Image (cartoon, rainbow, N blue to C red):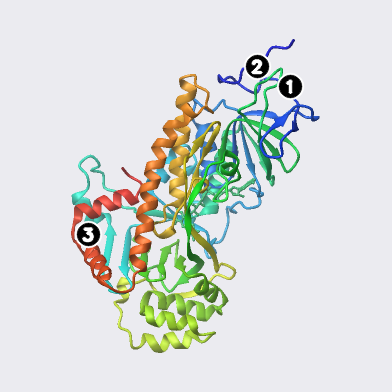
Amino acid sequence: MPPRISLGALRPLSSRPATATWVRISSRRRFASSSAEAPEVYDVVCVGGGPAGLSLLAGLKASPMTSGLKVALIEGQDLQKNRLQKDASLESFSNRCSSLTPASVKNLQEIGAWPHVNLPRVQPYQEMQVWDGITGARISFDWDTAKPLLSPRNPSRPTTIAYMIENVNTTSMLLSRLEELGGVDFYTSTKVDSIDLGTDTDKVDFSSWPILTLSSGKTLAARLLVGADGANSPVRTFAGIESRGFDYNRHGVVASLKIEGAGWGGPDHKIAYQRFLPTGPIAMLPLPGNMSTLVWSTTPERAAKLKSLSPNDFLATVNAGFRLSPTDLEYLHTLPSGQEDEVAWREKHTPVDSRAIPMRVTSVQPGTVASFPLRMRHADTYTGERIALVGDAAHTIHPLAGQGLNQGQGDAAALVRTISHAVQTGQDIGSTLALESYNSERYAENNAMLGVCDKLHRLYSVESGPLVGLRSLGLRAVDAMGPLKGFFMSKAAGGT
Ligand SMILES: Cc1cc2nc3c(=O)[nH]c(=O)nc-3n(C[C@H](O)[C@H](O)[C@H](O)COP(=O)(O)OP(=O)(O)OC[C@H]3O[C@@H](n4cnc5c(N)ncnc54)[C@H](O)[C@@H]3O)c2cc1C
């Protein structure tokens, strides 16, 4: 009788023969032996090659403790096709951009990915202007004013609040790093068709192992299955982990825009702007040169209207979003067209401090006006037997603080540390015990950030009443109190 393989303890998989064969015996959960091909056995199978999944794999392969693990990536899209061209024009930017915090950039440096970034396409910014669209109460963030009151434990003088970067630049640098490191089996343009539990056969006990069937027909067995597969995570569904939350009934309208100059601060001091309107915040974030990226959170009806406008009417409405009153904006959204003339007329009668708002947008890059539904979701847990969730698979957050992708980077780094520790101490990397530290470290931190962003959204959705006065008082008070401002800035930058 052939020896029975115990899969509890970690050992190199590449040398292990995969002898079991498989058929599905339950339509939902179980596989058993008899099909022609045995599943290929991996230490880590990651579903999802977005920023979170790629960062996890680069972290595993860059760490000496985990670089020997047998690892696979499954991604539904063609990652090579979606890659950023090295000579891409600086006049043209993807509409999916994120603000990477210094903590995320540090992690990308530590795993060796940052040298692969297309740096001319990254825009650091040094100041943020945030204001209430109803009362005009304002708070400005820049490290120069917060610096004297920074924590004595962190006396270094940062200048950058965050780095605006196209998501495709982030995934491209991570892919380049993975190619440099080697050792990942890529299954791209390949979807996961089903995930089932294995069975205990004569030779191998796979009864707690997820077995993945790919769209190509191939099957993989995972000691640890990582769901980095976005908000509708099939891995989370397989694991039976509930994800709770709600839809904001808001869409984030994005676009790549050209502004009339390099910005008020000039090319070396870039400013991010966000105005809270009752329907949601409108934000203009700097990109290199005189490019900018828009994120306007608004009702689905208004999002549809914005997308239907001619380029000139769209630009006028965006400029109005930073300049005109919420009542004016409401009216503009009822017009089928003609926003350009209407805004020009209304602006003549609306005084603004032009240095406190972004420069005017002068053109919109064709094909970049799009919208995404906004949701708040949080999985009940990030781990289960042989399961870990990272990134949007674990949580989705309102984009008003630009934290979603950064949270995924934090998850990936924490999971790499947890797996490294399990390897170092000889634990089974898929056991719930080994994964527990990942769950406890990340769940609480992400939950706090989800709560803050949700409350901010609610606070600024109120149009009248005492709350409006109170929130403006609060904003002005924080603006006047350097230590509190320094604290908020450290948190937003990804610090502790
Ligand atoms: C309007 C807007 C603005 C935002 N701005 C910011 C910002 O400024 N800063 C910030 O930090 N975050 C921001 N975010 C959030 C950020 O974009 C996301 O948090 C981030 O992209 C999630 O990355 P991820 O890797 O977890 O998931 P995704 O990027 O969703 O990647 C999941 C991957 O899994 C693959 N996949 C899914 N199912 C399968 C399957 N069955 N088989 C194979 N592959 C599969 C998908 O193809 C995809 O590539 C914003 C979001 C929105 C909507």
Q: Residue 338 at what x, y percent from top left?
A: 51, 87
Label whose residue precedes the other's in the sequence (2 or 1) = 2
Q: Quadrant of residue 164?
A: bottom left
Mark 1 vs ligand 1: CB below 8 Å: no
Give the label on residue 489, or none.
none
Q: Earlier in the sequence, mark 1 or mark 3?
A: 1
Asked if disc 1 and disc 3 are in contact, CB closer than 8 Å, the reply is no
Q: Helix or strand or loop: what does disc 2 sit on?
A: loop
Q: Tell which of 255 and 471 is nearer to you.
A: 471
Q: Is disc 1 placed on a helix, strand or loop?
A: loop
Vertical order, 86 against 38 (above or below): below
* Circle 2 residue: 5
Which dot marks residue 478?
Answer: 3
| Numbered disc in front, either 2 or 3 | 2
User: On the image, which quarter does residue 73 sit in?
Assistant: top right
Q: How would you rate the neighbour count of disc 2 (Cα within 10 Å): few for under 14, some for 14-19, many for 20 or more? A: few
